[in-house]
Image (cartoon, rainbow, N blue to C red):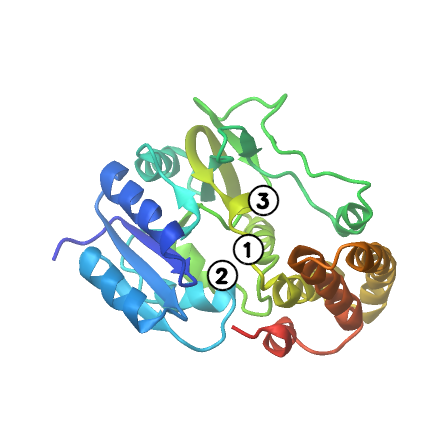
Amino acid sequence: METPLVSIVIVCMNRMDNLYPCLEGLRAHTGVPYECFVVAYRFSPENLAKAQADFPWVRWVVSDEVRGFAENNNLALRQARGRYCFPLNDDTEIREDVIGALVRDLERLPEDAAIVSPRLLNADGSLQLCGRPPYPARYYVLQQWHLHREPIDDTVGKTPVFDEVFRTSNITGAAFLIKTELFRELGWFDETYFFTPEDIALSTLARKRGFGVYVDRAATLTHKWRTTATRISPAIRPAAVRGSLIFFSGGSRLKYFLLALPVWLAESTKRAKAAFRLRRDPSEANRIAWETFRNITRNIFTRRTPKQIFQQYYHG
């Protein structure tokens, strides 16, 4: 069996409409030796059997217990044989050899380079994200009040290291290439968090250990995240907010409280607005929005883990 250069890991939550275009794009446009894991998260038996038959070259990892982004990815990452790992969201489409381009980048970058990510495009072709600048705790709080917006292009005004490759600070979990040995040393994804901010936590840890994070502006893929929102946001969002507060407080109870209070006020305001909209229009979308903000405000000051919060509200 040929030793893969890259281990691709995709987590899919029973979304065949996402998975099939993602795998078809990988197969058509990946020009380096690779192995591909798909973590089949809570798949129906029918969907699992069909997907396994349609994509026999994929290594399938069945995940039927309630797990988050980090846990599901780590199930497959621990089996990786490649020199590099490429975690990839299932709601992405590859239309060029983006993985080969990122491999060539890491082979040209300094030895302390750990991660390189591509430029992400929205489904309409507009820019979604190209690198990520530092994201301190105060930005997180301000963003909940709509007083801060993360820049979508961290390469503006910078000098490239070479070609279209730039140094950046953080990655997005949608797609990135990382050295496998280093990923293993860093402990893979931190399972403390359930949905976010595993990606920022990983790149922050890498930088603290003295490793570099980069983005290649010329390597692109499409990330359809705005089109794949689901009805389980009342379970996802409170877990995500709790996870973010845990990360940004850095283990300090005082800092947690100082961050959590303005976030709770912001989410309470959103909850009140959502309740008003629900009274005027008792639609399914408005009900989901109200439940989401209600669950967030109820769990900001809890001691429960993000996973425990998700388990309480997830009814899938």
Q: Does residue 31 appear in this view?
A: no
Residue that appears at 32% across and 32% down: 96
Q: Position of residue 24 (x, y in %)?
A: 27, 44
User: Are circles 3 and 2 on residues that touch, CB within 8 Å?
Assistant: no
User: Are circles 3 and 1 on residues that touch, CB within 8 Å?
Assistant: no
Tag 2 or tag 3, which sits nearer the N-term?
3
- Indicate the quadrant where residue 14 lies: bottom left
User: Are circles 2 and 1 on residues that touch, CB within 8 Å?
Assistant: yes
Residue designated by label 2 = 186
Task: Give the class, few, some or many, for how many residues have Cα within 10 Å of label 3's Cα (few <14, many ≥20).
Answer: many
Element on which disc 3 rests: loop
Tag 1 or tag 3, which sits nearer the N-term?
3
> What is the three-letter code of the residue carrying label 2?
Leu
Q: Residue 202 got which mark?
A: 1
> What is the three-letter code of the residue carrying label 3?
Asn
Residue designated by label 3 = 170
| Left or right: 254, with 122 as reference point | right
